[in-house]
Amino acid sequence: MPTASLQRPVPLNWAVWIAIILFIPIGLFLFGGGIWLIALGGSWYYGITGAAVLASAFLLWRGSRLGLWVYAAMIVWTVAWSIWEVGFDFWGLLPRIAGPAVLGLWLCLPLVWRKLK
């Protein structure tokens, strides 16, 4: 009986590897800090966002375009959370949205998504 394998179904190029290498520490930092914040009674945003970034990294490592969609969903709820937290104040929104947006733009490069299945 075949068992599930962690082998990648498609070879990845350097642009996808850069995204994976960036997403893993970012996701671990957000997830770990988010769990700590949840334990203190704070916002669940960081824990959920960290888990999504880690899931996106894993899916990209597997060669799946679903990793792009998970990251896109994370950007949508980041924008919603940011507006809920600070309103439409540009300087309040900038630090909350700029980092995820830059990484999201990287994922939009054809060099990244073209090889994914």
Image: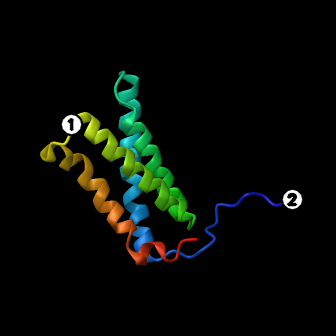
CA gap, disc 2 to disc 1? Answer: 54 Å
Where's the N terminus, which quadrant? bottom right
Given residues 22 and 100, the one toward you in this image is: 100
**How many circles with numbers are drawn on the protein?**
2
Instruction: Residue 46 in the image: state x and y as whole percent.
Output: 37, 38
Residue under label 2: 1
Up the image or down, 18 lies above or below 46; here it is: below
* SS for callout 1: helix
Q: Looking at the image, which residue is at 40% across and 73% down?
A: 15
Instruction: Residue 103 in the image: state x and y as whole percent.
Output: 33, 61
Given residues 3 and 97, the one toward you in this image is: 97
Given residues 77 and 59, the one toward you in this image is: 77
Q: Quadrant of residue 24?
A: bottom left
How packed mark 2 is, by other alpha carbons closer than 10 Å (few <14, some 14-19, many 20 or more), is: few
Farthest left residue?
91
Mark sitting on residue 67: none
Where's the C terminus, which quadrant? bottom right
Residue type indicated by callout 1: Val
How packed mark 1 is, by other alpha carbons closer than 10 Å (few <14, some 14-19, many 20 or more), is: few
Residue under label 1: 86
Q: Report if the CB atoms under discs 2 and 1 are less than 8 Å apart.
A: no
Left/right placement of residue 32 relative to residue 115 reads left
Upstream in sequence: badge 2 or badge 1: 2
Residue type indicated by callout 2: Met
Q: Looking at the image, which residue is at 40% across and 62% down?
A: 21
Instruction: Residue 35 in the image: state x and y as whole percent.
Output: 41, 32
Instruction: Residue 62 in the image: state x and y as whole percent.
Output: 57, 64
Q: Looking at the image, which residue is at 47% across and 51% down?
A: 54
Farthest right residue?
1
Left/right placement of residue 87 relative to residue 68 reads left
